[in-house]
Image (tube, helix red, strand yellow):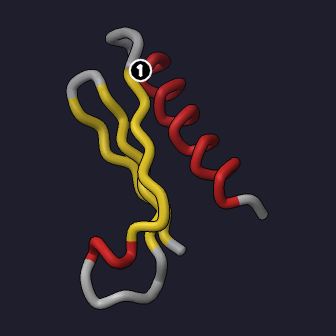
């Protein structure tokens, strides 16, 4: 499984991708978005952490 994060203006997108599948859409296991509450690097870090923790909670061990 591959976990990735992309940041956009005001939003963080996190995705979990399966290792198998011919097309990207077939590989997406979970996708989560999290708003960025402010303009600082700390606000961005909090949003990234929130999105990744949500994916981790859904996937489990």
**Res 27 quadrant in image:** bottom left
Q: Depth check: give the residue in front, 47 or 24.
A: 24
Say which quadrant the N terminus sits in.
bottom right
Q: Which residue is mark 1?
A: 41
Tag count = 1
The residue sitting at the right extreme is 61
Left or right of residue 57: residue 12: left
What residue is shown at x 27% (from left), y 75% (from top)? 24
Q: Is residue 11 above or below residue 31?
A: above
Query: In the image, what residue occupies the spot 48% across and 70% down?
Result: 2
Residue 21 position in % (x across, y down): 36, 88
Q: Is residue 19 left or right of residue 55?
A: left
Residue 7, x across and y down, in percent: 30, 38
> 10 above or below 38?
below
Residue furthest out toward the front = 26
Q: SS class of the residue under badge 1?
A: helix
| Identity of the residue furthest to the top in this view | 38
Vertically, is 17 above or below 55? below
User: How would you rate the neighbour count of disc 1 (Cα within 10 Å): few for under 14, some for 14-19, many for 20 or more?
Assistant: few
Task: Return the x and y of residue 47 as percentages of the image width and height.
Answer: 48, 27
The quadrant in which the C terminus is found is bottom right
The image quadrant of residue 38 is: top left
- Residue at left 25%, top 82%? 23
């Amino acid at each position: 499984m591959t976990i990735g994060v992309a940041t956009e203006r005001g939003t963080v997108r996190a995705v979990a991708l399966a290792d198998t599948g011919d097309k990207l859409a077939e590989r997406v296991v979970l996708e989560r978005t999290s708003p960025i509450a402010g303009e600082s690097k700390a606000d961005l870090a909090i949003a990234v952490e929130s999105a990744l923790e949500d994916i981790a909670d859904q996937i489990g061990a």
